[in-house]
Amino acid sequence: MKLQFQSDLSYQLRAIDSVVNVFQGQPIRQSNFTVSYGEDAGLIQTALGIGNRLDLTEEEILKNVQEVQIKNGLPRSENLKGMNFTIEMETGTGKTYVYLRSIYELHQKYGFTKFVVVVPSVAIREGVYKSLQITELHLKSLYDNQTLEYFIYDSDKLDRVRNFATATTIQVMIINIDAFRKSFEDPEKEDKANVIHRPNDRLNGYKPIEFIQQTNPIVIIDEPQSVDTTEKSKEAIASLNPLCTLRYSATHIDKYNMIYRLDAVDAYNERLVKKIEVISIRSEESFNQPYIKLVEVKERKAKIELDVETKGNVKRTTKTVKYGDDLFDISGERELYRNYIIEQIDWTSGNESIEVGGYLLKIGDAIGDIDDDTIKRYQIRQTIEEHLDKELRLNPRGIKVLSLFFIDKVANYRDYDKDGNPIKGKYALMFEEEYKKLIKKPKYHTLFKEIDDDIDVEKIHNGYFAQDKKGKLKDTKGNTQADTDIYSLIMKDKEKLLSFNEPLRFIFSHSALREGWDNPNVFQICTLKDSSGTYVSRRQEIGRGLRLAVNQNGEREADYSVNTLTVMANESYEDFVTNLQKEIEEETGITFGKIEKHTFAHLVYSHKETDGAVQLGYDLSKKLYEHFKEKDYINEKDKATTLLKEAIENYTVDIPEEFQPWNKAIMIELKRITERLPIKDGSKKKKVKLNKAVIDSKEFIELWDKIKYKTVYSIQFDSEELIKKAVNSIQGMKKIEKVRVISRKDAISSMDRLTGLDTVTVKEGVKDYVSIRHTLPDVITELQNRTNLTRKTIVRILTGSKRLEDFKNSPQKFIDEVSKLILREMKFILQDGIKYYKMDDEFYAVELFQNQELLAYLNDNAVESTKSPYDHVIYDSDIEESFAKRFESDENVKVYVKLPNWFKIDTPVGSYNPDWAVVINKEGVEKLYFVIETKGTDIFGFLRPEEQSKIAFARKHFKAINTDVTFEGPENDVGDFLLRVSSSNYGKNG
């Protein structure tokens, strides 16, 4: 099985464009499609090979960066402070794919060829190498079979470094930070330096690092928070002499010049990763017997958990104790703890323990509670049961389900007897015992028809652990040679694990091996540890299963109801959500509810006359921020106050008149900022049942018979009209000025043995760039590639516009502006030229409702229903919730349906799934039939272009089926909608 990659995911394309646009104005290169500034654009010949060349000034780069930041709603950089650029992408959203494709884009557009990927660990190094392998054919198909050579740096294979420097094709070197951060210039420490910093006879006495330096590489840092947080690491990165540094992670510490952000909240809300549900597994706190659990031991003190009474309330609390402490006093004088004295603390490594009240407790041990192994067994059982339930739903869809267990000690899964023979650890035994019990349940009969319990159960689970030289499994910290071997095995098995032909479905892994590996079909994660875990373990472990699932063809599963990651937590649901949210804030810099000066800068509205997007911009955003401060909507820490949250809820936010065009967009942004992390409580999960009475009712059958038909469309395109409109638009385009040359005179102000030369600027000036000495781009082919129009049409548009003089002034800017204008006119003409035709013999049968299995989270994403095909309506937003509740309560609404994801309309920009269909009684005599699209705004121009197009095409679809169904949208207020359609004037004006 081979994983399939999508090339058109808009959020990934935005991330790639954000990087490419940093270099806007850099001379473009020659490709197979276009003759331009020359094959050597972006390249420079050096003494040791061929390097990247940057022709832009720092001022030009900064201007580009600021434009990208405003577009993406990010803090504005006032100066660069080095060529470091930050790209933040949530785990599971394709960060590696994005930077690998960015390499191709930077080469295609600017000719850059030398790239170094710096990684913090063996795991991530192997993951990057695997990604290069599995994306190779896909990326070549997108970039005209462009050659890209890649390798892992190996100090025993230095010829690869020489080839990296001298080759003219794209070169990608993957290197671990540990391979080049030891010793640089000190000759006395040369024998301790990494090989990369030592002169080498095989390289004619040069150091390997010198070959890399002369290529002026673009350095990509994968997980910079683990790579260059020390001065030595920063020095090592600088020693590569990078043209620039692109920094990719979900959890940045240093955020230099952020140019793109897709944080955890955005990824969840935009459905780019699996939704998370939490099933809490822990013993109930009875407080009827003395409970003591040993959490941690340090020198002369220990941390314990016990039940403490404060002001009449008993709460399980963590306290630090020392020798001689009386738990009667510490517990708030609870009689249960009388005579429980800390009698001994042992902090010897490997023997950490305490004696209390005659009991010896090691770390993780507890008294007065359900036995810890009983909890672990229940966690395992719940994980298996959840896994089997998902197999019942997903196996028929060709989706293999995987479950992942993280454990602290390898011996708990695989141990050895006194003769060194492997034996099953306690977790392996628990797993097999619980699995054999569960598969005998009648509901799983279809999964297990003929199965040999003893043989087959051993094939379905296995562990990935490092081994010692004798082959024994062992505990490690994740950075040894033994880890290298196990990572290699995990990576090689990544695609194999997704196939039904591979019986392995339950994976046990050491918690130290959590980084660098994930699998899209991990649906359950269970952590069998002694405590709830730290932030890193919680977030990283969840990250192993966030990617959207794939089917047996390796294709991403688009149905979001399939994509749920279930976490078996040994803490309450509330604690899990609160702690995860708090820890995300600490690690990523996301502050839930935080409003800053730049927050609204990227918001736009659509200008009615020009159809252009009008951006709020940084200055107005700052002004709005200051207004909200005055209104006490934002506190001193820039966090939204209760006053603002109440105003948002009641739609009473005070927004000044000058911001009215952006009003709706501002409200949507405020609502997004103040939302909590959308994690579901798995204990409230319920299977949704069919409302047979509604499905069989006359009203529903009439509604369904009107909307069920499928359509086909044809495209009728008038090229003469396009040429005419494009010519007019280009003639109205602003004048494109000539490229400027900046001249500067510097004088030496001081000279020092340590710091070298200091200079001072004595003269600076700007002149028009009059003499163009390079070959002009093939503008026709470049525009042809961007618009897919014929050369003949492009030539007629350009000659008709009479603006080719602007092209000579600034070729790149001319191409960018003209292509935007042509594409805009094409969009309007295409929408007008699409014709839909009804297919009488192709329709969605009402019986399909019986085949769909839905799961609702009560009080979270479901409204109880008596008017729709199911007993609960599942909603995805507050707006959808308001529509469902009003439809249920409004006596004029007879039946309605949240249209299932299989109800799709084909459009030229992808399939489209409307939100609602509803029957409304008007004045008791007339029935109105509607299909509705709900959005965060009711202003069409505020929608993304692809959303606008889909809605426009949906109108044509329902007009073509001609069954008296009215399509309405976008709608964001159910009261306004019902009032409008119920009025006596509705429909009279067409």
Image (cartoon, grey):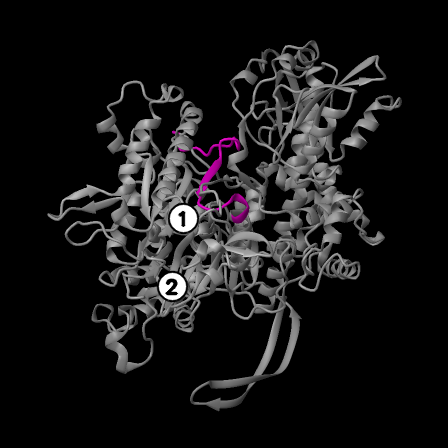
Residue 112 visible somewhere in the drawing = yes
Nearer-the-camera pick, 28 or 891? 891
Residue that appears at 28% across and 73% down = 193
The disc, 2 or 1, on the residue closer to the chain's N-terminal end is 2
State the residue position of label 1: 368
Q: Position of residue 126 (x, y in %)?
A: 32, 51
Report if residue 827 lies within the magenta region.
no
- Residue 210, by quadrant, is bottom left
Q: Position of residue 142 (x, y in %)?
A: 45, 41
* Magenta stretch, main secondary structure class: loop
- Residue 977, by quadrant, is top right
Count the marks: 2
Tell me the quarter of the image containing the N terminus. top left
Q: Is residue 159 left or right of residue 954?
A: left
Give the magenta part as a residue range.
552-575
Residue 36 visible somewhere in the drawing = no
Q: Are marks 2 and 1 in contact (CB under 8 Å)?
A: no
Q: Element type at marker 2? A: strand
Q: Is residue 644 above or below residue 953?
A: below
Q: Position of residue 660 (x, y in %)?
A: 81, 49
State the residue position of label 2: 342
Q: Position of residue 762 (x, y in %)?
A: 62, 84
Q: Element type at marker 1? A: loop
For the residues marked 2 and 1, what is the alpha-carbon distance in whole angstroms?
A: 16 Å
Nearer-the-camera pick, 526 or 513? 526
- The amino acid type, in three-letter code, at marker 2 is Ile
Q: Is residue 547 above or below residue 41?
A: above
- The amino acid type, in three-letter code, at marker 1 is Gly
Residue that appears at 27% across and 61% down = 350
